[in-house]
Image (cartoon, rainbow, N blue to C red):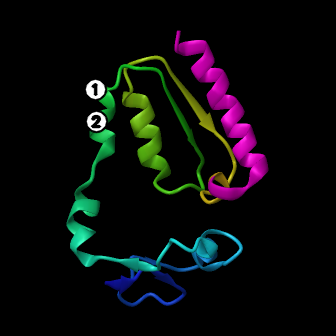
Amino acid sequence: MIEKVHFKSEGLVLAGNLSYYIDETRGGGVKEWKNQFSVMGWETWLNFDPVSKAQHITIPFMVIHSDTCALAGNAKRFYQDLQGVKELVWDGFDHTDHYDNPDVINLTVDKAATFLFNNLK
């Protein structure tokens, strides 16, 4: 196992200003979360390609994302390739705001609930 996150860059999965994962009042405060990554998972993680699967999705689907979320370009391509009823919510929030910012969560849950209510009949 290697350390997953800290503010140095040698031998890590994530590096840089990722304070969410270290801040004990946010993600780093989840007692079950360990700051570890099994290097055996690299190949699977690096070869995982959900974008190529979007063309097979025909059920109603909502994508909630932003330019400051991880892999924004992939999210746009994924959305474009979806085949069923779809909605794109491109907000201005940071990636981790979708995890634990109550205002962002309430907004996106309301949008998702409306989308699902209107499309799952």
- Mark 2, secondary structure of its residue: helix
Q: Estimate the spatial distance between the alpha carbons at disc 2 and disc 1, rounded to whole Å.
A: 6 Å
Instruction: Check residue 68 for magenta coloring.
Output: no
| Residue stretch in magenta | 99-121
Q: How many badges with numbers are in the image? A: 2
The residue closer to the viewer here, 88 or 4, is 4
Any mark on residue 98, and which? none
Residue 81 image offset from top left, x and y in percent? 36, 29
Hey, what amino acid is under mark 1? His
Q: Is residue 105 above or below residue 63?
A: below
Residue, disc 2: 53
* 1 vs 107, nearest the viewer: 1
Percent coordinates x, y for residue 49 in the rendering = 28, 48
Which residue is under mark 1? 56
Q: Residue type at mark 2?
A: Lys
Kindly indicate whether the residue at mark 1 contacts the one at mark 2 (C-beta within 8 angstroms): yes
